Amino acid sequence: MGLWMIIPVILAGGSGSRLWPLSRSKHPKQFHALVSAEPLLVDAARRVPASGAFMPPFVITNEENRFGVVAAFRTAKLACQGIVLEPEGRSTAPAAAVAAHLALERGGPDALILVMPSDHHIENPRAFLAAVEAGRGAAQNGRLVTFGIKPTKPETGYGYVKTAGPADQAGAVLKVDRFVEKPDRATAERFCAEDLYFWNSGIFLFGARAYLDELARFEPAMVAATLDAVQNATADPMNFIRLADSFRECPADSIDYAVMEKTEKAALVPLDAGWSDVGTWDALYDAAEKDERENATRGDVLLRDASRCYVRAESGLVAVSGVEDIVVISTKDATLVARRTESGTVKEVVQQLAATRRNEAEQHTTVHRPWGNYETLHHSDRYQVKQITVEPGAALSLQRHHHRSEHWIVVKGTARVTIDGETKLLSENQSIYVPLGSTHRLENPGLIPLTLIEVQSGPYLGEDDIVRLEDVYARV
């Protein structure tokens, strides 16, 4: 049997609300450097280098996060086969079906797909690749392989997989007996004590054709809807694959429920690679390096008489004194203090913020755009101040505003500014005024990032006061 190529499929949807205030719905946890120096999404892509057995990955996400994916791959200089945009989230089974249809187009009838969440941490990438290699033969023989984590504690927040027998050697492929829902504490303790139970990692390896064939047995409507969505998808120069609107008609279900719990072809490969879903601050604490008092810190942190704490300072100094087992997360616009072992309840805090329409539930003071980003430095009744960064060669849309005028001061790099058809080049310490209602565009023609300070003034300063006349990123 020859070598079947593996196409990684990175699932990059979700909001990561349990990691608020760092993770926000418009810039969720996969775009943050939570464990390593790079975002979780980049860590996931680097885990499966586009060489040897692996083709470049597909990333499946949504319209809101599409430019975050572009920026992450661009900064990391990573290849990507395509960024698939779902018009509406329908869970993991339809996402995998879309990937399988695309894999058959790009990789041929023998293509294997490796489905991975974008927001997990794996401490030992080599061990991960060894597990994937162990499962390759089973996948080539038509088995649907999942990767199981041997429990290290009685975790009630994970689903479990029970195997028909224990692993008798490294790299073993085990027959799956059944999938088990998230258990209560006593049941989780029993699972931990037995050799047959594994945490469900949510990582899968199977032939594209084999997955679609099994899915067609149990969910034929899902196969039909996803095929139509792929066949009628549209592509653009930014490597986006926009699924057709028929994707909304697809039944919503997970890979586990739709296929794995029903098929007789399920197999499990034990994965011993330092896996964590970093789903809560407590899980991130478990994955972090700790000092002699079992504290984990990141950023400018001062500890005094503190034990077993996780403290993260994204902005400014955070001092913690005389406490145990707490989480402190400080960003520029919000701070969380919680009991570390109950950090999973942060999701309820985010729900409260959303119910009262607090902006902190959705986005940071820094907002990412396809051309770069902007950070709100000050906001008042009739004016606000922003720092704008434009990447080399990038340009904002040709636009105008109905309610505000703007002043731009260049502090780094070179700006090309067009106002009502007249174009000027501005260098550091030069400024320009953009009158209310004028047609204007900002570009960076240089080789280094352009940074400028923008002062907006007017009766309404919302981001929806933008009329885009031309836009290379196809926004409206």
Image (cartoon, rainbow, N blue to C red):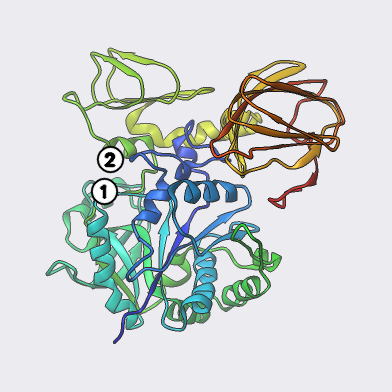
Residue 15 vs residue 47: left or right?
right
Mark 1, residue position: 123
Q: Position of residue 155 (x, y in %)?
A: 29, 47
Which structural element holds mark 1?
Answer: loop
> 76 above or below 3?
above
Residues under numbered marks 1 and 2 in contact, where contact means CB atoms less than 8 Å apart: yes
Q: Pointer 2: residues within 10 angstroms few (<14), some, or many (20+)?
A: many
Q: Position of residue 50 (x, y in %)?
A: 38, 64
Residue 64 in view in this figure: yes
Query: Which quadrant would residue 270 be assigned to in this image?
Result: bottom left
Viewer-nearest residue: 301 or 324: 301
Mark 2, residue position: 287
Q: Position of residue 395 (x, y in %)?
A: 67, 42
Residue 261 in view in this figure: no
Amino acid type of the residue that numbered disc 2 sits on in the rendered structure: Ala
Residue 80 vs residue 167: left or right?
right
> 30 above or below 113?
above
Which structural element holds mark 2?
Answer: helix
Amino acid type of the residue that numbered disc 1 sits on in the rendered structure: Glu
Viewer-nearest residue: 65 or 153: 65
Identify which residue is drawn at 43% across, 52% down: 118
Residue 408 vs residue 147: left or right?
right
Query: Which quadrant would residue 306 be assigned to in this image?
Result: top left
Query: Which quadrant would residue 78 be assigned to in this image?
Result: bottom left
Identify which residue is drawn at 27% across, 52% down: 187
